[in-house]
Image (tube, coloured by chain):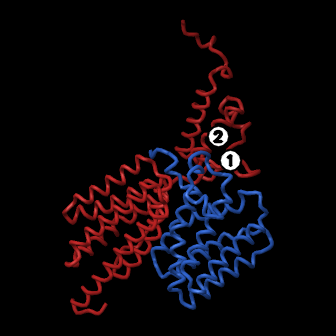
Amino acid sequence: MVALTKSNVASPKNCFDFRVGLEGEAAAAAARVRTAEDLALLARTLDEMEGLRTGGQLGLDEDFAFHLQVARASHNDYFVSALQSLRESIYDGMLLARTASYVVLEEKMAAINTQHRRVYEAIRDRNAEAARTAMRQHLLRCKKSTRHWYPTGNDLDRDLYDQAL
Amino acid sequence: MTRLSVDERPPLGLVRSSSLTDTVYKDMLRLIRDGSWAPRMRLPSEVELARHFGISRPIVRQALARLREDGLIQSRQGSGSFVCNIEREPQVQFPAIGSIADLESFLKFREGVEGEAAAMAAAACSDASLVKISAAAMRLEKTGELELLSENDFGFHLAIAESTNNPFYINTLKSLRDNIRTGIGLAWNFADLRGDFLSGIHEQHHAVVTAIKARDPSNARDAMRAHLSWERARLMGEAGEFLTHAGTSP
């Protein structure tokens, strides 16, 4: 049986840390090579999530759809496969980001939508650097909101992204 | 001191609590390992756990705190504690490299992921990991044959991923092993590529190691990205030439 140690844990923190590099790059690539159709599809995923404003829905499918569409718009199959493989872990992280803090759900959703929109606009404007930064910041903010539930100790002491926000 | 008989041993509450916490913690660990406490399952309440293990609530709490520190359970406001989803390591599936275009996409993908891994290594990897990373770079420098070249190049990149202690990075790199070897193999087919291609790689690996040693995340990221984008440019350039000479337009 495999020994269970911290390094084996597919924790939300580890997942977010991985996604920062992966999806930041995917967003930059999407900004460079996206087509008009890609952009239209991205706008649609954005609208679908913004349409969930009231009613207490978590919008996990819609959120994942936005991220997946950014990856598709990069026209790089490796970004797409990576996201699809990690789907379950990503859903765990998204759920935790919504439920693990004291902020009201509607405010959470509004913040996520604002951050998604910033990514969308950078891709629309073909600004690779802005797209990368917007995506990274979005993921880091989500990760930050799950902070209460981190294991204590080293993970927090030496978090690379502490100064990033 | 004579040993006490069973009837004379002190009741549980008087046993040293640190060793009792240890025992309970290990029992709980076993339940998680063998799947009795399944991923995403909500743990019984502290009262129920105390009753089940025949211990006090403070001991339950100590054992749970250790599991939480391990990252094996997590608590949710108002809902209790849940077993983390750890039943399998994250599996990442990647398409094989079938064309030069695939190779280019593959290297772009690596730039993003491995750049970040290098930054994380610089920020937080242990000294022991750093030794492994340096050793892997040196091992590659001493290698001559193609078969070992791709294996040892992979070994260097894997060492960096492993130093992050993040299973997503580690498993992604492992899944990329075959593709990385295909890439190096392809590079080797382009005749003019060998000499300074290899020395370029060594130089760039060295720059990455230096930045990680200096605990400079930003430079580590840049050095790794520069390395992979250089590799991409060389391979795409050579691939273009190769295809032109072979009579096919790129």
Q: Residues within 10 Å of mark 2 (few under 14, many from 20)?
A: many
Secondary structure category for the residue under label 2:
helix
Q: Residue at x 25, y 68 (%)?
A: B198
Residue nearest the viewer, comparing A163 with A46: A163
Q: Residues within 10 Å of mark 1 (few under 14, many from 20)?
A: many
Chain coloured red in this rendering: B
Q: How far across and down, in percent of the image, does residue B180 sit?
A: 34, 68
Marked residue chain, label 2: B
Q: Which of the 4 quarters of the picture holds residue B26?
A: top right
Give the colour of chain A. Answer: blue
Query: Residue A118 vs residue B118: left or right?
Result: right
Q: Look at label 2 and name its amino acid.
A: Leu
Q: Is residue B6 above or below residue B205?
A: above
Q: Would you say the residues marked 1 and 2 are in contact, meaning their CB atoms lie under 8 Å apart?
A: yes
Q: Are marks 1 and 2 on the same chain?
A: yes
Q: Which residue is mark 1?
A: B81
Q: Residue at x 52, y 80 (%)?
A: A72
Task: Specify the label residue B64 is tagged with.
Answer: 2
